[in-house]
Image (cartoon, coloured by chain):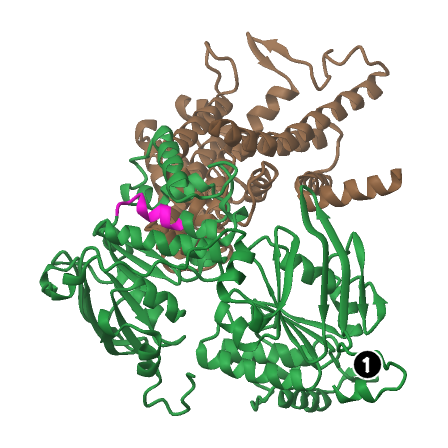
Amino acid sequence: METKTFRSRAATKIVWPVLALALLILVNVLLDARSFNSFTDAFREGAFLHISFKNGYPSGALIDILNHGSKVMILALGMSLVIATGGVDLSVGAVMAISGATAAVLTVRGLPPTVVIPIALLISMVCGLWNGILVGMLKIQPIVATLILMVAGRGVAQMITGAQIITFHSPVMEFIGNGRLAWLPLPFPFILVLIMLFITWVSTRKTAIGLLVESVGSNPTASRFAGVRATSVIMMAYIFSGFCAGIAGLIAASNIKAADPTHAGLLLEMDAIFAVVVGGTALTGGRFFLGGAIIGGILIQTLTTTMYAQDVSADVAPLPKAIVVLIVCLIQSETFRNKLSKTWRRKQS
Amino acid sequence: MPDIHSDPSTPTAVQPRLLLRGTGLDKRFPGVHALQSVDFDLRPGEVHALMGENGAGKSTLIKVLTGFHRKDAGTVLLEDVPIDPASPKEAEATGISTVYQEVNLIPHLSVAENIGLGRQPTRFGLIQNRAIKQRAQQALARVGLKIDVSNSIAECSIAIRQLVAIARAIDLDAKVLILDEPTSSLDAGETAQLFEVVRNLKAEGIGIIFVTHFLDQVYQISDRITVLRNGRLIGTWPAPELPRIQLIEAMTGNKFSEQQPRTASVEAGTQRPAEEAVIQVKRLGRRNSIAPTSFHIHAGETLGIAGLLGSGRTELARLVFGIDRADSGEVRINGKPIRNGSIPAAIQAKMAFSPEDRKFEGIIPELSVRENIILALQAQLGPLRPISRAEQIRLADQYIQALKIKTPSPEFPVQNLSGGNQQKVLLARWLVTQPKFLLLDEPTRGIDVGAKAEIENLTHQLCQEGMAILFISSELDEIVRTSDRVLVLRDKMPIGEVAKDELTEPFIMQMIAKHEPEGAAN
């Protein structure tokens, strides 16, 4: 019974983003139907739901969403833990740039991927540690503390690359962002998402880390009084967020086979925060929902893809995106739902 | 009431005129019938105590009277005129003002601004500061308070804030003043001061509804007592005609055997040498917080700490548990010194601490009862040695049963439980770690009589099972009932220890009051 109530709580949280996602896909199908003047062609070539097989690998808009959304989804996993502690990590976009820059420079120097990848991830975790020290030990407000690295991090990435775009050629490094496995023909970045989801889930829910994170986020003082080492819990969350940003940074660099310190991961921290919040984790800290964050990430990417498909210019695209996020947040808000149902009942009577 | 007798139009009026009269008040919430056809009346110049356990309907009744909730049925007459306020503001305008337990003043504003808030005199749309100040001073004079009204509220003590809130409430020609647990954060001297103000307001003819959990205070100040239970009116009595036992019985609905006097379980304990004690505290102190203090507690012994609010009780507990770092002295458990200023070290040494402020320092509101119960043990084991879910459920069920925690399910968020049950969850959290030494800081604050008795009995039981307990409370009768010895603090200093055979309330009161300039304790 206990597990049931626990699951049902996570389930009710995930209902809204899933519904929103379904609705968004429906909108795309309707838009297709309008442009084709027919409903029967929902799966034909060029349609949103169409999946073709090129060289035996599936491709199409849905596959693209999983592929391109992988960075936000991975960021959202780390962001979930940080937000659950009552914080926020604005620096993930900049850390992506640092990670990509490090990997590109080392690859160009001729180091093998087995050395390059661990070093890039290690540096990303050091970035997370920096945030963790500022927030956990020095008690600086998370939004300010991580803003520092958000601004400074791009400068660090520029210094690493010598302020230029560095292109690289390495089969392994290129595979991370573009590869397909023969036995599992999904985009490799999305497979990374699934692996990271599993790792995060096991390391939070199969250990006591998840409980301690939620406890610190829900009431830091009471947690400390109960013997929880709140500082280390907070630092761990930021280090893990840095690690996730490192992986997302490798994917971003691999996608374009280059490190672009100015544009890699730009504004992705916002998408990651949206994904986490849409997925049911409150910005005030406490309970977190990993599955919700992944669905939230897919939702955000679907929105972006829809904009591109409808030829909305990239400069205007954030507006409709913000509106959809607002709607999902409103539906999630119990206060808003109660108000809505009250007005509804009043109209009926 | 000479004016009534001299009034020729009402020759038959023998009874005093009623100020406020509610008849058949009814209120339902989803799933709860919170108020079931309750009658309540208030005379001018009367203090009418409203009593009942948590969930009895006291708050609902008050919220219906003040317009916070709309009543479902019934009538309210204020001076024989029917009223139906739609908001607390409307109620204030008709003459019903309320001061809540957690005083709702705004900390960064000045005293004057707080009193005038929302009703500032303006001229041409501009607020007139001087007029506000004058009015605030007049209002404060009525409650006998002389302070600089331009001070910010944040600098005032809780007692002063309470008086400022009352001044704000009566500033609007209040006829009815509702005091909702006004004394829960006050010490004895401050309470006496508050009661003085209440008596003055009474003499002005204001009717006062007084909600409290403190039995003593009810008898000190009230003229009549009304008891509610489970949303029903149990009865209204003149205070002198209702013996204490009957009042408790009316509130709890059970025959109540008066608190068992503490069985002298460790009479010989006082003779045991300090070195064999479970906890030994030697000259533990911290600058500006508490002067060096020493004590020891043996297994199966309870040491009470008595002292007024601000005497250093909580500060001492925080030092012992390692929340704050001590400047001097040491803590030993079973002879082994504990690392200074480390909560995990204290817990590792089998200490446990139930803090004074349950809401902000105790419970983890969003987490379930189960998670709250296993939290301290899990924190001690560390993140990488999780307690299996089966074990968690077993522990939670065991302690929910043993402590009679009322919760629909172990998975229920702890924030939705009543105060008494939250306190039990906190106790369970520490009992799971099997402590040798238990620090209880105000464990019965703000919880109802039934739960209070249960917590006290539990303390006795744990003590008899061999735990060493430090018991802090501002209620002396509770300390006397619970403790074997009592350490008395005053002005952040220890002033002496009272042994078992001298342990009475007056004796401790005298100790605290001795040499006090104003002799506040009475």
Image quadrant occupied by the C terminus of chain A? top right
Q: Nearer the viewer, residue A40 or B379?
A: B379
* Residue A83 horizontal/vertical position (percent): 50, 45
Image quarter of residue B279: bottom left
Chain B, which colour? green
Q: Would residue B284 be seen by someone viewing this image from the given angle?
A: no
Residue range in magenta is: B426-434
Identify the residue at image location x=50%, y=81%: B192
Note whether A195 is above or below B502 in the view shown. above
Q: Report the side of A284 relative to A45 (left or right).
A: left
Decide whether the magenta segment is chiefly helix, strand or loop: helix
Q: Quadrant of residue B149?
A: bottom right
> Is A166 above or below relative to B259?
above
Q: Is residue B233 above or below residue B198?
A: above
Q: Which residue is mark 1?
A: B125
Colour brown belongs to chain: A
Q: Quick check: is B280 in the magenta stretch?
A: no
Q: Residue at x 65, y 29 (%)?
A: A302
Amino acid type of the residue tagged 1 in the rendering? Gly
B335 left or right of A94?
A: left
From the viewer's side, name the closer residue of A278 and B372: B372
Identified at 32% across, 41% down, the residue is: B378
The answer to if B433 sits in the magenta stretch is: yes
Q: Going 72% across and 45% down the picture, which residue do you hit?
A: A336
